[in-house]
Image (spheres, helix red, strand yellow):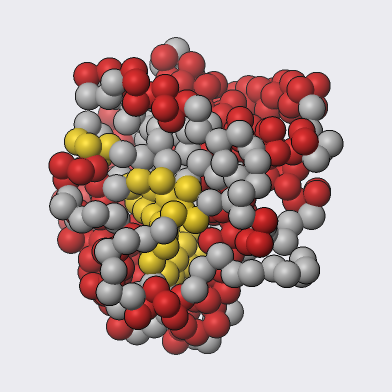
């Protein structure tokens, strides 16, 4: 451990606090300068570079996935640019044996957790093979129903506790997800049973087009953990080091048997909610966009690493070229997947086919063989 290393989070104080004010944890400011050295994460130079590589990979993936969607080669896609620190730095603090429950914008974490990118592309297309996960991959497919993953995560976390597991569950939703019933039920049940769950709320300011301040009267989203009796933290979601440190401490807290933690990351999505017709210029101003562009998580991490002599533009350019090549290979692999038939969907609807499905299978099998 680093000398004079302090904890970023005082969990006991959070549990006993009656204040609605939650101080935002930050390590790197907008210029990439360290403002709270006492809570710097214990990461090696190699790990810092690896985290930056994952963030650059995610930004390039977002750009290429957007282009592929426009070309008709991808289906559903929710842009991720701007949320790289919130997504990848939190994921970086977890292990492969921790169980991930992503929302539909959280494909980057899922791929870094072990899902082949080609399979993620198949999921985007609605291909059934995109949801066939091996048992070795501790994750569920991205949840489309807003907030429903919180209930699922709670269930697995309770199961982990009953099995005396040394791992944790981590789950993501957006600011709008905190107004869903499943959000509260997941927090409450996990809190009551002290289950090892880390609930991450990525507050990007808008639940599709509804500003955060209009969809809840809560001063912060972090304080919603108070009602469930669990500690909650608000962190600068554009600061990769702060997100990592808070997530790491939350994992240590949860796996030590103390119960769940709620983390609110203050972040921003630079693109639309999804590429399915949303136009962010109708509900966001250029002035707001400009403010958050200056907080770009890649910009501040890039400057921090450059100042340490760990990063260069040439290094980043080489990485970008490699990522583009990997994405091209993955989309070609997805293109090579067998085309879906109606019978494929019918066969996986039930393990034991009821009579009506058997009749439909017979009907479509005959049609497809003609």
Residue 231 point in image, percent of width and height: 39, 72
Does 207 sit left or right of 63 as displayed?
A: left
Q: Nearer the viewer, residue 289 or 370?
A: 289
Q: Nearer the viewer, residue 56 or 235?
A: 235
Question: Residue drawn at (58%, 79%), measured in percent from left and top?
Answer: 166
**In what quadrant of the picture does the C terminus appear?**
top left
Q: Is residue 158 visible?
A: no
Question: Residue drawn at (50%, 33%), measured in percent from left and top?
Answer: 295
The image quarter in which residue 308 lies = top right
Q: Is residue 72 visible?
A: yes
Q: Residue furthest top?
A: 71
Residue 11 point in image, percent of width and height: 46, 75
Task: Tell how many labels.
Answer: 0
Q: Residue furthest right?
A: 309
Residue 337 to residue 313: above or below: below
Does 311 sit left or right of 246 as displayed?
A: right
The image quarter in which residue 300 lies = top right
Residue 8 point in image, percent of width and height: 56, 65
Q: Residue furthest front?
A: 35
Residue 23 to residue 17: above or below: above
Question: Residue drawn at (53%, 61%), measured in percent from left and top?
Answer: 246
Question: Residue drawn at (17%, 50%), measured in percent from left and top?
Answer: 216
**In what quadrant of the picture does the N terminus appear?**
bottom right
Residue 185 point in image, percent of width and height: 23, 69
Q: Nearer the viewer, residue 198 or 216?
A: 216
Residue 48 to residue 80: above or below: below
């Amino acid at each position: 451990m680093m000398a004079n290393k302090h904890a970023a989070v005082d969990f006991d104080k959070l549990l006993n606090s009656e204040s609605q004010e939650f101080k935002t944890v930050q390590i790197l400011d907008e210029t990439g300068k360290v403002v709270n050295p006492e809570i710097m994460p214990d990461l090696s130079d190699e790990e810092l570079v690896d985290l930056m590589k994952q963030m650059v990979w995610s930004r390039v993936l977002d750009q290429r996935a957007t282009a592929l969607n426009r070309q008709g080669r991808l289906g559903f896609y929710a842009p991720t640019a701007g949320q790289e620190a919130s997504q990848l730095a939190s994921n970086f603090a977890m292990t492969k044996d921790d169980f991930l429950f992503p929302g539909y914008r959280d494909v980057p974490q899922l791929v870094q957790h072990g899902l082949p990118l080609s399979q993620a592309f198949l999921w985007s297309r609605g291909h059934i093979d995109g949801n066939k996960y091996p048992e070795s991959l501790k994750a569920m497919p991205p949840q489309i129903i807003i907030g429903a993953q919180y209930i699922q995560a709670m269930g697995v976390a309770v199961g982990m506790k009953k099995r005396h597991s040394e791992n944790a569950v981590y789950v993501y939703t957006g600011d709008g997800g905190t107004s869903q019933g499943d959000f509260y039920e997941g927090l409450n049940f996990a809190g009551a049973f002290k289950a090892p769950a880390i609930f991450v709320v990525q507050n990007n300011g808008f639940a599709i087009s509804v500003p955060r301040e209009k969809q809840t009267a809560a001063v912060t989203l972090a304080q919603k953990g108070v009602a469930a009796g669990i500690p909650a933290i608000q962190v600068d979601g554009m600061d990769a080091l702060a997100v990592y440190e808070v997530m790491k401490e939350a994992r240590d807290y949860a796996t030590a048997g103390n119960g769940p933690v709620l983390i609110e990351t203050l972040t921003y999505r630079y693109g639309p909610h999804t590429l399915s017709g949303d136009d962010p210029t109708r509900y966001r101003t250029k002035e707001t966009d400009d403010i958050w562009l200056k907080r770009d998580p890649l910009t501040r991490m890039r400057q921090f690493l450059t100042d340490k002599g760990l990063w260069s533009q040439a290094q980043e350019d080489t990485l970008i070229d490699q990522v583009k090549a990997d994405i091209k290979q993955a989309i070609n692999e997805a293109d090579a997947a067998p085309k879906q038939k109606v019978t494929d969907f019918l066969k996986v609807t039930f393990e034991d086919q009821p009579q009506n499905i058997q009749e439909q299978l017979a009907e479509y099998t005959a049609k497809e063989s003609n």
